[in-house]
Image (cartoon, rainbow, N blue to C red):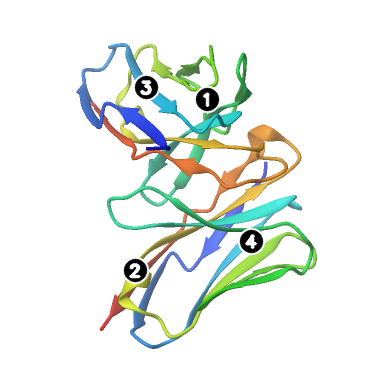
Amino acid sequence: IAGITQAPTSQILAAGRRMTLRCTQDMRHNAMYWYRQDLGLGLRLIHYSNTAGTTGKGEVPDGYSVSRANTDDFPLTLASAVPSQTSVYFCASSDSGLATGGEQFFGPGTRLTVL
Amino acid sequence: GQQVMQIPQYQHVQEGEDFTTYCNSSTTLSNIQWYKQRPGGHPVFLIQLVKSGEVKKQKRLTFQFGEAKKNSSLHITATQTTDVGTYFCAGGTDSWGKFQFGAGTQVVVTP
């Protein structure tokens, strides 16, 4: 079934720990994105990648890193988690870029709690 | 920096009534997208507007992009219980990293 998968579904993490959220799409989309969703703030773009091998910073990149080794996978890493990173994280992909527009397909999300 | 504001934050609607949610950007947008997120779910794409003054309809939903490409609206007629959810606008510019979602309008429908 075509789409985006994210893992884990939820996670409770101790502050200071390293954590990688996984995202895989099988639609062969060039562009992929990571957002965090917090109550009252909507979705905020953390990092994006417009094609395999390239990444860029979004609105709230601090404390997060990404890599795009191939078209399908776009992992998000928290090097040393802090409580303010408690959020719901969504991965998305699109056939075309943010500047030109194009439907973004979202994964089911990862609920992360940092204590 | 770029700001995308959405109002109202919350909308309580009687079934059968109409309502409108508005999206305003501090900067000119290259495109605007609208998404719907059901409670506990993920955002689902509704539509994209690109042209100044563009109007698009999807059954009971009417989307409009302002002439200056800085604002947009979503109007729903004859609201149904299936319209429950949060509606987000999202604005794109020529810069990849500047794509921004509004905070959303949470819609509650009373039968």
Amino acid type at image mark 4? Asn
From the image, tell me which residue sits under label 1: A61
- Quadrant where the C terminus of chain A sits is top left
* Image coords of residue B45 (percent x, y): 50, 53
From the image, tell me which residue sits under label 3: A22
Amino acid type at image mark 3? Arg
- Quadrant where the N terminus of chain A sits is top left
Q: Is residue B103 above or below residue B55?
A: above
Query: For the residues tagged 4 and 3, is the chain the same?
Result: no
Q: Residues within 10 Å of mark 1 (few under 14, many from 20)?
A: some
Determine the CA span between mark 2 and mark 1. Answer: 32 Å
Query: For the residues tagged 2 and 3, is the chain the same?
Result: no
Residue A115, can we see it? no
Residue B111 is drawn in which quadrant?
bottom left
Q: Is residue B24 above or below residue A64?
A: below
Chain letter of disc 4? B
Contact (Cβ within 8 Å) of mark 4 with mark 2: no
Residue A27, can we see it? yes
Chain letter of disc 2? B
Q: Nearer the viewer, residue A115 or A35?
A: A35
Query: For the residues tagged 4 and 1, is the chain the same?
Result: no
Amino acid type at image mark 2? Val
Residue B39, label in figure: none
Q: Is residue A2 above or below residue A14?
A: below
User: Going 44% across and 48% down the picture, which residue do you hit?
Assistant: A41
Q: Residue furthest front?
A: A1
